[in-house]
Amino acid sequence: MNDQNNGITPANMDFTDTQHTFAHKSTRELKKSAWLFQLMARPRLVKWGNAVAMYAAKAGLPVAWAVKPTLYQQFVGGETLEECKKTIENLASRNISSILDYAVEANETRTDFNKIMKETSASIQFSGNHAAVPFAVVKPTAIAHTKTLEKAAAKGKLTPDEALQHHEFTQRMEQLAMTAVEHNTLLLIDAEDYAYQDAIDEIVINLMRRFNREKAILFNTWQMYRTDRLNHLKNTIETGRKANFKVGVKLVRGAYMEKERECAKMKGYPSPIHPDKEKTDMAYNRALELCMENLNQVAVFNGTHNEISTVYLAQLIKNAGLPKNHPSVWFAQLYGMSDPITARLAKEGFNVAKYVPYGPVKEVLPYLSRRAIENTSVKGQTGRELQQIKSELARRKAIGALKK
């Protein structure tokens, strides 16, 4: 691909139809979302607010009264699987699937690991019973000792205790894979820090060898801002071809850029991250091409808020003469963000889903904190979200529909 966008621009797919995008939202709801994104456009305020909320939660002070009607309502589907049903039904009525993500982080105790395993298993079973929820999610560091994971990734010699911890983590991953197969649920395995990822990749690819024989059930995640991921993806697809298993590929740009660069500098190794966004974009779009070129071997999950990459995959599907809803190709965005992209894809008939986090208010605060901070750091993201909402409010005002 010589030109990173290959002639594809967002103009080829209209993301400006705010009337369609926000038809399900009242003016009051839109005004609240606009207020929230205006706050998130102020990095210092976000940083201060997050610090106060996290401190209050740790001190046992009530925070739900402030968080639940604001950040939580915007970005989280509910406290329990049962509570998420209303969100799932709302999305399904607009031809949008849901991906339930238990967004609670562990304190690296066996009790916490067991709690998260129980809930993740329940979400997999829930998915198997609901056609509108085709995927479930597991975050590896929520069920693993991260220091042991880092040591295993570096091929360090594990102590007996560490070897046991790593064995238990492998068993947990295997158990979730078996549950996914039993309930015919597609399981997305989140990407983690560079320091942990090699150990996770090894386990997941071994599980793919066992469980992805007939179709891709397990999806590993490739963060394309990493300089080595394109070659890693090529090698994994080739391994799958030779060993006769399907490769589930979830593509994202990456979530830990600043952290990874700082860690590399501190530990004295070259940054694993592309030097600029342009190179990341090129790697990402090339990865989309690679997946589509090998669709007999691959199922691809395009997890992006980027309009160019969204349109580009849609064009690749068209160029290949495939139906828009081909079962091996999915698009997804986070709940509460990039609604114009999701709505347009759904209207066009593509397979599209929202990543819907859930969990108790206090326990998902770390997730919400990251979401708020990421919205201030992702170039233009908050501004785009806000502008789209303002455009719809202006449209309603012009036709006298603001009271609806």
Image (tube, helix red, strand yellow):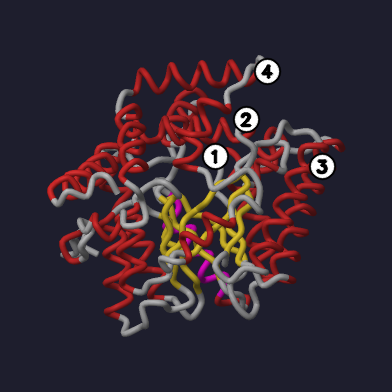
| Overall secondary structure of the magenta section | helix
* Percent of width and height locating residue 163: 82, 42
Q: Which of the 4 image quarters holds residue 195?
A: top right
Q: Is residue 244 above or below residue 88?
A: below
Q: Specify start and end residues of the magenta stretch as a single range.
A: 228-240
Task: Give the labeled residue for mark 3.
Answer: 163
Residues under numbered marks 2 and 3 in contact, where contact means CB atoms less than 8 Å apart: no
Q: Secondary structure at mark 3?
A: helix
Q: Secondary structure at mark 1?
A: loop
Q: Of residues 93 and 208, which is closer to you in this image?
A: 93
Q: Is residue 260 above or below residue 198?
A: above
Task: Give the labeled residue for mark 4.
Answer: 60
Residues under numbered marks 3 and 1 in contact, where contact means CB atoms less than 8 Å apart: no
The label on residue 362 is: 2
Of marks 3 and 4, the one in the foreground: 4
Residue farthest left in this picture:
398
**For the residues marked 2 and 3, what is the alpha-carbon distance in whole angstroms?**
33 Å
